[in-house]
Amino acid sequence: MIGMYEIIEVSFMVSGHIKFLPDGYFGNIKALFQKTRVNTVDDVEKLYYDFELFLKPHFQNLPGIQKYQHFWFKRSKPGKIFTQKEAKGEFQCFDILKNKHFNIWAPIAIFSSKPLLLARQKYLYKNI
């Protein structure tokens, strides 16, 4: 949101097409990345950020998000998300910004954090 990159591309595996034991853990990792700021392995252990609390007032949900595999965010098109249902498919564009006066160039404030509970640390150690 602060214009560091021209394009950000995010792609997910097609669900149900590959049956390999480690693939079962990708869902756990994906859920963890959705809720945690991770730069190093130690970050997984130390910090938890609630990005939904920050994003929800400013952005709409993407309808039918689970049917898309590829997502592009372009600096030249703030508030818009470009999606593909399959590789080499056509892109669809959605405007997900709720408030057109929202300053997308403003720096993101530091999120409050809380340490992981011991039970959660043990779960992560065992399962990731």
Image (cartoon, rainbow, N blue to C red):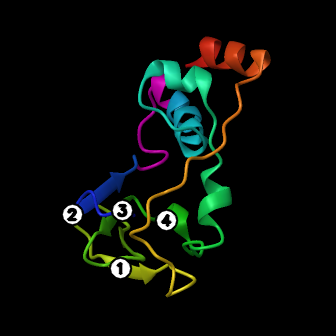
Residues tagged 3 and 4 counted as in contact (Cβ below 8 A): no
105 relative position to 15: left or right:
left
Instruction: Compare residues 51 and 80 and report the one nearer the observer.
Output: 51
Q: Amino acid at mark 4?
A: Lys
Numbered range of the magenta stretch: 14-23
First-in-chain label (3 vs 1) = 3
Q: CA distance from mark 2 to mark 1?
A: 18 Å
Q: Position of residue 32 (x, y in %)?
A: 58, 36
Q: Is residue 16 above or below residue 84?
A: above
Instruction: Compare residues 114 and 72 and report the one nearer the observer.
Output: 114
Write down the residue under mark 3. 2
The majority secondary structure of the magenta stretch comes to: loop
Which element type, helix, strand or loop, lies under badge 2?
loop
Numbered disc in front, either 4 or 1: 1
Numbered disc in front, either 3 or 4: 3
Write down the residue under mark 2. 6
Q: CA distance from mark 3 to mark 2?
A: 11 Å
Q: Is residue 94 above or below residue 15?
A: below
Residues tagged 4 and 1 counted as in contact (Cβ below 8 A): no
First-in-chain label (4 vs 1) = 4
Q: Position of residue 112 (x, y in %)?
A: 66, 42
Residue 72 highlighted magenta (yes or no): no
Residues tagged 2 and 1 counted as in contact (Cβ below 8 A): no
Write down the residue under mark 1. 92
Q: CA distance from mark 3 to mark 1?
A: 23 Å
Which element type, helix, strand or loop, lies under badge 3?
loop
Which element type, helix, strand or loop, lies under badge 1?
strand
**Mark on residue 67?**
4
